[in-house]
Image (cartoon, rainbow, N blue to C red):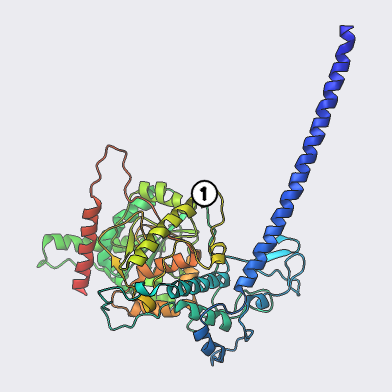
Amino acid sequence: SKSKSKPKSKARTLTKTTCLLVVLGTLVGILTIFSLSIGHYYHNQYADDLLSRMSGMTAFQSSQSSLNGEASQNSSRTKPQPNAQGSLRDEVTKKDGNGNDKHGNKNPFLIGRDNDDNVLDARHERSVFQSIIDRVEWTEQQCAAIPSDQKNTLKNPFQPITDLPMLPEGGVGPSLQKWLRDNPLSSDGNDNNTNYDESGKAYPTCRLPPSTSCNTSTYTLIMMSHTTSRLHDFMNPLLVMMETWPGLTEVIIVWNSPRETLTSMAENTDAPSPNKKKADRNREIQERQYASQLLQWHNNSTHPLRIFFSLENGLENNLLNRYHPLLQPKNEAIMYFDDDGPFWSKDAMITSGFELWKRNSDVQVGAFPRNIRYMSQRMKDTGRHGVDSSIQAIASNARGVDLSPQTQSKHHHPLTFTPICRNVTGDTVEYNYFVFPDFDAHVLLPSGTFLHRNFLCFIWHPAFEELRTYVVTHKTYPDDMTVSTLISHLSGRAPRTFPREITDGVKEISRNRRMLMLEYDRDEREERDED
């Protein structure tokens, strides 16, 4: 009897197992349908919110009355006129279920999610500009809400150091709105914008880089110089990088002087003046060798180094040339060093910095930070809250939360920005050049930074012509803080920092932070004295 009962027991077990699998399969199917329904609902909510937020004129009522009555005229070219409200909703062409426009062409301003579900490309320049406009509007609202007892509380008023007038507070908002109105989307669905630079030439459409670039393994080094005397500073470090740093596949030397400054030095065969000191004569001989070596690398088509002669490419001697799109770096990741350094180690730059950039490729990443000192208690309190918000944002991003500027600008501002209300409260700030604050950085100095090449398009975008003019006409030529601040506003995120020196726990650091600061400030003073 026992032998006959075994088949029945196996049959009952098989039946129970089959029933259990059917029940589990049914539950999984129900949960899947439920999740898709919720996702579809929130996707529609997000798209409607983004479109409604970006349509129409949202801020600057006082300035827009003059803009709305201003006729957009340009004698050198004729451009299609935008709609009266400057609405992005009206500028987007109608599409079919596959994201095509009425002509059947793919509209690059749309991202296909489903057959009939498209939203505006959040990384397109128009979306990015609208995000900055929203942030300026939010700042105006915060300033207007400040209690009267907190207004004009500073004892020391702002003292300008130049006769150059300051840029208007929040002026980037009206400027970008005017640009959006004067440069509508192309109606043929092939080109995103009808962009023109200062000279009237067509300019490409810019897009923010992805938030991560984890599969990137190579990078381009860019250094800028204008005099052969700086060859002594960067040629030896450059040679070490090219020979030993993994992933370095391209080097671009941006030369802001005539080509002859290099060729004449390399071709000079005259003996150094005997009246010079021996050290100076040796230095001159070494300088000729450096110039000759640099040109040999450039003339060798198989060598990774090439020289970009700015003047031969229609540019002037400009500190911003190292960020010009004409450089056309072949790698997405760009590593910057000043021609006089400081030059950080391979461990700091590659093991730490490059890896950090891969995980934050939509911001500026660097090891040479500075910060801005807030003078009012209100800004200090707000700034501390911003640091906490930034830490929370980074932690949330690690869990996969979307922290793109457009997502945050649904609340009209990224959480990490501190409003300055100069017109309302008399707020002033100071550039803090006494310390290098790794954990409270507002801007990064260029040497030892990583940047995605997509930002080059934005830095030289026609919409920011006034900002570039301000940099080259100001006595201090503030290209470093201007570029760093602009990138933060474009991305909606603060820069990320990494340590300049990495030790194994035994090797003593050769220079502490204070010595590095004194050396850098000494060089700055010497350069000012020479000027």
**x and y, in percent, of residue 310 in the image:** 39, 73
Q: Name which residue lies at 64% across and 70% down.
A: 51
Farthest residue to the top: give it: 1
Closer to the camera in the image, 218 or 479: 479
Question: Is any part of residue 247 visible from this angle?
Answer: no
Farthest residue to the left: give it: 275
Closer to the camera in the image, 141 or 318: 141
Q: Name which residue lies at 21% across and 59% down.
A: 519
Residue 402's place in the image compared with 25, above or below, is below
**x and y, in percent, of residue 410 in the image:** 57, 66
**x and y, in percent, of residue 64 in the image:** 53, 85
Question: Is any part of residue 429 visible from this angle?
Answer: yes
**How many numbered circles are shown?**
1
Residue 331's place in the image compared with 33, above or below, is below
Q: Name which residue lies at 31% across and 48% down.
A: 501
Q: Name which residue lies at 27% across and 68% down.
A: 265
Q: Which residue is mark 1?
A: 398
- Quarter containing the C terminus: bottom left
Q: Amino acid at mark 1?
A: Ala
- SS of the residue under disc 1: helix
Q: Dot 1 surroundings within 10 Å: few (below 14), some, or many (20 or more)?
A: few
Answer with left or right where residue 324 lies relative to residue 342. right
